[in-house]
Amino acid sequence: MVVIDDAEAKGLTLPETYGIDDIPVVLQDRRFLRNGQMPYDPSMHDKMMGMTGNYPVVNGTIAPFFVVTTNLIRLRLLNGSNSSIYTLAFNDGRAFDQIASDGGLLGGSARIQSLRLAPGERVEIVVDMSDGQGAVLRSVASGGGDGGMMGGMMAGGPAFDFLEMRPSGSLGASPALPDQLADLPVPSAGSASKIRKFELQMSGMGSFAQFRINGQSMDMGRINEVVEKGVAEIWEVSNSSPMAHPFHIHNTQFRILDRNGAMPEPGERGLKDTVLVNPQERVHLLIRFDHYADADRPYMYHCHILEHEDAGMMGQFTVV
């Protein structure tokens, strides 16, 4: 994990003492053998569904705990798994405040009791531990299905206990969270010059499964899109497959305009570079590439489930 802060964020009364009240937390599930080895040898099912593990791992550690010494704790969460989509909550049902998404602080904190985090997504939350009671951050089983292949494709992530929070005997005081965190104007579709459409597609089963975007699998020799630097566009991402796919775009941060015409939840109204697109869902993103342009060297957009991008659910674009 790379943590990037700026003067504006440093000027706020947020928990920011690394290792004390500001903690990076990389969430993964890994498949270990009884002898401790962790081979990567994906089965047909793994390639279709994405590989999941039998042990939850936090920052490379199994069964971790953190000794809390302050009233408020800031957790910078990253889903670093191959494919698991986690629904995160605390075992005692306590609410917490989301203060940031992939690309930085939200306009204001969002009070929630659970959140969904797909591979590649990042969020920051602040947890109030002033009651002195311990709590466990866990991935709650979600979704459903009939237990068969298609049911499994529609199901949610695994149920795991990730991180135990153990308050010390005496907790230090923490400043209250500020009402405003960042200046984030409401995004307007009217600022966009064009619309590009991307359809996430799966077909076939098992070893015959194919993963495409707009009918094409990844080809290193093909540039799928050419984008003009500094020009706002709307990228419409739809999912015609039976699985949710986290769609990641390189070289920018975007704003989510809507999901199936509805405004995104407060935690998704900040800067993002990965968006989870559910089956039969259509999302609109307001996007602009302001930083790096290269007519020859492409950037990528892809599903952030490792086995899906490896199987072809990826495309390339240049910025000119």
Image (cartoon, rainbow, N blue to C red):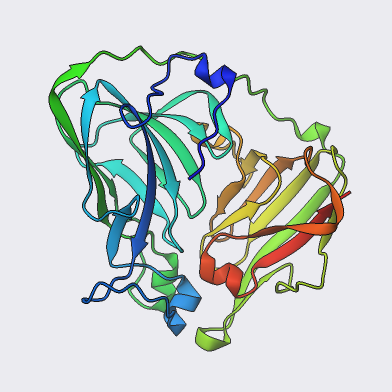
- State left or right for residue 250 relative to residue 165: right
Q: In this view, does 34 lie above or below 282?
A: below
The image position of residue 52, as x and y in percent, is 38, 68
Q: In this view, does 258 lie above or below 162?
A: above
Q: Which residue is drawn at 52% across and 36% down?
A: 101
Quarter of the image where one finds residue 25: top left
Q: Can residue 222 be seen in this view?
A: yes
The image position of residue 48, as x and y in percent, is 49, 76
- State left or right for residue 302 relative to residue 177: right
The image position of residue 205, as x and y in percent, is 52, 84
Q: Which residue is drawn at 53% across and 66% down?
A: 306
Q: Can residue 265 be seen in this view?
A: no
The image position of residue 103, as x and y in percent, is 59, 36
- State left or right for residue 97 relative to residue 310: left
Q: Which of 230 and 190 is in front in this view?
A: 230
Quarter of the image where one finds residue 37: bottom left
Q: In this view, does 117 lie above or below 81?
A: above
